[in-house]
Image (tube, helix red, strand yellow):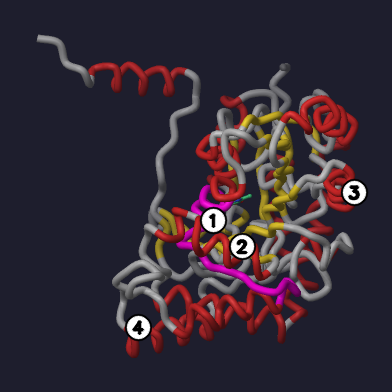
Amino acid sequence: MSDPYTWLDQALKTLHRADWYRRPQAIAGLPGPIVEIDGRSLLNFASNDYLGLAGHPALIAAATEAIAHEGTGSTGSRLITGHRDRHHQLEQAIADLKQTEDAVVFSSGYLANLGTIAALVGPRDGIFSDRDNHASLLSGIKLSGAKAYSYHRHDLTELRELLEVYGDRHRRRLIVTDSVFSMDGDVCPLPQLLDLAAEFDAMTLVDEAHATGVLGRTGAGAVEALGCTGRPLVQVGTLSKALGSLGGYVAGSRSLIDYLRNRASTWIYTTGLSPADTAAAIAALDLVRTEPERRAQLHTHANYLRTELAEAIATLDLPPSYHVLPSESPIICITVPNPATVLQIGSALREGGILAGAIRPPTVPTSRIRFTVRADHSREHCDRAIALLREAVVPSGD
Ligand SMILES: *Cc1c(COP(=O)(O)O)cnc(C)c1O
């Protein structure tokens, strides 16, 4: 008798052989600049908790209070029994931050992207997508059934050609892009994308997952930082990175949000955000507004780490495959020649007490060490990361 599951073990072996195999590691204690893994304290340069809010007493208190009054689960979808005043409050707070007419929260950023893209376009439509967009955008594109055209990162000339050649074959056009590219740290050319969108009668969806709370004068994101507030846009993002909670959102015009509440299946057919997550996100948005110094601190550390790492790499006389990628965010990456090397460097950093991302294919085309900075890091934390990286990066001849 044949076993229809034997291929799984084969597939796992292949993953191991390619150094692509991954598994989760348990972190103990509150989220913070120092985390505990396997009983060891590590300096955390791998979290998305940019402002240090996930373990903040105000978020913990808000979530605890919400559970005490409204329980642990929201018990139903938003259109049936899962809607509370606090969801409305959170959506208002997001719309206020983004300066949009309205906003809607989803159970995750991933689901926000799936539901929004599939609601806005279908098989008769065309999507113009940056090749390096986040996996959730790519899944949304597939789910929509629209014809997808991809352009190389930031390549506005290629995008213009695609829009010229294929644009009017479609009923609707949607340009889709990350604002901060999560595995690199650079920012999309949003003003130019919006000009092209206007010229070719296209909608634009921008994913602000790594920019919300981080970029812009008020923390509204890359849209604000790049002077695009108020332009016609579909802004998607997450509550689970700088905002320290869980969930996703879409912000935009009243009609857009109204339409999504009626048509986004990942919003309609899933349980509403829990009271605790909702309350924590509201508390986080309060801190984003009232404590801009967190953001300032974050950028001070990020600028320092970026400059010093580039300096360190330049002085080490390494092959050109090692370099610091261009970044305008707290995500700072150093490319390395191959997955095996990135694993070695990752373990050496960890041995020395630094937790950083060792990012490999298929997540990215080229392996890289990825540091993410937090507002609650100190200058000494950054100096330790730099010193240790210098030791960990040993020229291997390739
Ligand atoms: C993290 C991330 C998401 C997914 O958000 P979740 O709330 O974690 O599901 C979507 N897009 C980008 C660019 C991200 O980095």
Circle 4/circle 3 CB separation < 8 Å? no
The label nearer to you, 4 versus 3, is 3
Q: Secondary structure at mark 3?
A: helix
Q: CA distance from mark 4 to mark 3?
A: 46 Å
Q: CA distance from mark 2 to mark 3?
A: 21 Å
Q: Do tag 1 and tag 2 residues touch (Cβ < 8 Å)?
A: yes
Instruction: Read off the residue under disc 1.
Output: 112
Toward the left, the furthest residue is 1
Residue numbers of the magenta segment: 97-116
Q: Position of residue 261 (x, y in %)?
A: 51, 64
On screen, 324 above or below 328? above
129 vs 269, nearest the viewer: 269
**Residue ID for mark 2:** 250
Looking at the rendered structure, the kind of residue marked 2 is: Val
For the residue labelled by badge 4, is the local secondary structure a helix, a strand or a loop?
Answer: helix
- What label sits on residue 195 in the rendered view? 3
Say what secondary structure mark 2 lies in.
strand
- Mark earlier in primary sequence (2, 4): 4
Q: Earlier in the sequence, mark 3 or mark 1?
A: 1
Q: How packed is label 3: few (under 14 Cα within 10 Å), some, or many (20 or more)? A: few
Quadrant (top left, top right, bottom left, bottom right) of the C terminus: top right
Give the number of the disc on residue 67. Answer: 4
Q: Nearer the viewer, mark 2 or mark 4?
A: 2
